Amino acid sequence: MDEARRIDDLGGWRRSHRNNELRASDIGSEVCLMGWVQYRRDHGGLIFIDLRDREGLTQIVFDPDIAADAHARAHALRPEYVLAAKGRVRSRPQGMANPNLGTGDVEVEIYDWKLLNTSQTPPFEIEDRVEVGEPMRLKYRYLDLRRPRLAKNFVLRHKAAQSVRRYLDGLDFLEIETPILTKSTPEGARDFLVPSRLNPGEFYALPQSPQLFKQLLMVSGLDRYYQIVKCFRDEDLRADRQPEFTQIDIEMSFADEELVMDMAEGMVRTLFKECLDIDLPAVFPRMPYDEAIRDYGLDKPDVRFGLKLVECSDIFTNSGFKVFARAELVKCLKVEGGESLTRKEIDELTEFVKIYGAQGLAWIKIKENEWQSPIVKFFSEEEKAALAERLALKPGDILFFQAGPADMVNTALGYLRVRMGERMGLIPEGSFAPLWVTDFPLLEWDPEEKRFMAKHHPFTSLKPGQEELLVSDPGKALARAYDLVLNGNEIGGGSIRIHNAEVQLNMLRALGIHEAEAKDKFGFLLEALQFGAPPHGGIAFGLDRLIMLMAGATSIRDVIAFPKTQRGTCLMTESPSDVSSRQLRELHIKLRERPQDKAAAEARPAADTTES
């Protein structure tokens, strides 16, 4: 290595300031800065470097009239080299201040510096303005995390976690860890399984949440628990879902819905105030589940804008348009000003709703003197008049219809509503609208399994006085459950739990889990509930999703340091990966022939059996 690129030792140097800290009040101060070279510019003998760390940038200057040797060596500097630099803070020349930079009024004239490391040319520029494909970003995640936007996300995440801890500590909660290796139980998403070497043929499961353990902590008398904890679910992924994610998990004894919800509201308000200096409402509004589905199609409505759904089933009961007449449910979404949508744009929306089970998308454009649509010829004048009155139609509107099973209709139009709110610019930028959704059904019917499933989980208590419904009409029972929704995203969900063993057994029976299976899977909980379990309830927040919303990110992968792809792989470490045959033998596991083994065998040349 040439002399100019000789790697130096820190030699006792200590950083005095981060690279976003210096201001005009620091002019004349001696400072020591450390970081990475963002840009290098050579202007008429002066060399300017923008020095970057996780907090921001400071411009440093190498001037041959101030330190000739330091200036001469600075010609070797390149992007992403790592520096330590000592100098004096001075004002930037008149007209050269940068108002977009916190340190934009000052620069540092350098009289000595150390080269702490060199760098290869990165596969992409380390700056926010450069568009980089996600596969490349995830492969070189350690470089992606140097970019200011992502670095700020993790500063925010840290501040949020500390804010949560301070808030809950002030309410007498204890932070308690629960096991990662636990028992596989039904009635949830697919478990990640871990084979036990010491117990051949048996498996642990990674926890989908600490649900049972936190209930046991309430039985134990520890009273108020929380944990910021990793959870695991082996399910299909998307922008706001990962196989491993982080929950703020909270449980309290001697609590009802009001106590839990008041505590949770206070925590979220504190988070937004301390981390973003945003004041959320003093009281979060509440909406029953049935109203959310009726007006918004989803149980996590974004209430920052209108566009409510309108049911039209009764209008088409005897319609000549049989698709509507025979449907279980017909609903409409009216979008003012949407008449300008082109046929190509409508076709794109049609493909969009198919994601949610729709077969297509019926539409009508309301023009000055006509209704334009392939379906309007099937409508009677009475049906058109009824639609016009119910929807208060006027020229420029467009109507979107879905007809069919209620779940599909509500889901497809619910997500279409959000898509149109974004497209039409109806969502106020930078706004936050928290909302409690309450009065959920306790159970929902699964037509494939032909049995009831828990809407939340099988440990959720039902509304007082409805115990008989578990036997006589389970579908009508309501849960003591509550979800906290923010801008159309569920950020937290919880319930008051069942704290009586007999009621818990009845709940499991309603789910088709018979007593023998219940004792096999949940015997430890059922036994614990017989030893004076107090009434208790809680809530769990998805920390990743919450930080995503607070940071204005579009994917939780932008707020998780080392996330997985949609196929659950890590492009950086190339996991999951093969393990050795020896490891498998130790775990008493034998694999079926893997696709890569079969491909390798087919690629090998056949043995030569020709007689000599």
Image: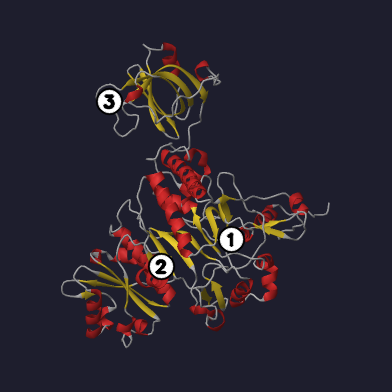
The mark nearer the N terminus, 1 or 3, is 3
The answer for how far apart the CA atoms under marks 3 and 2 are is 53 Å
Name the foreground residue: 146 vs 522.
522
Between circles 1 and 3, the one closer to the viewer is: 1
* Residue 545 placement (x, y as % from top left): 46, 53
Identity of the amino acid at label 1? Gln
Q: Which residue is mark 1?
A: 211
Residue at 25% over, 65% down: 338
In the structure shown, which secondary structural element does the residue marked by tag 2 occupy? loop
Up the image or down, 118 lies above or below 263; here it is above
Q: Is residue 140 visible?
A: no
In the structure shown, which secondary structural element does the residue marked by tag 3 occupy? loop
Identity of the amino acid at label 2? Leu
Name the foreground residue: 341 vs 398.
398
Identity of the amino acid at label 3? Met
The mark nearer the N terminus, 3 or 2, is 3
Up the image or down, 108 lies above or below 288; here it is above
Disc number for residue 96: 3
Q: Which residue is mark 2?
A: 298
Name the foreground residue: 470 vs 170.
170
Q: Is residue 414 visible?
A: yes
The answer for how far apart the CA atoms under marks 2 and 1 are is 25 Å
* Residue 264 placement (x, y as % from top left): 46, 56
Between circles 2 and 1, the one closer to the viewer is: 1
Task: Classify residue 205 by image quadrant.
Answer: bottom right
Residue most toward the left? 369
Mark 3 surroundings: few (<14), some (14-19) or many (≥20) residues within 10 A:
few
The mark nearer the N terminus, 2 or 1, is 1
Of the 4 image quadrants, the one containing the N terminus is: top right
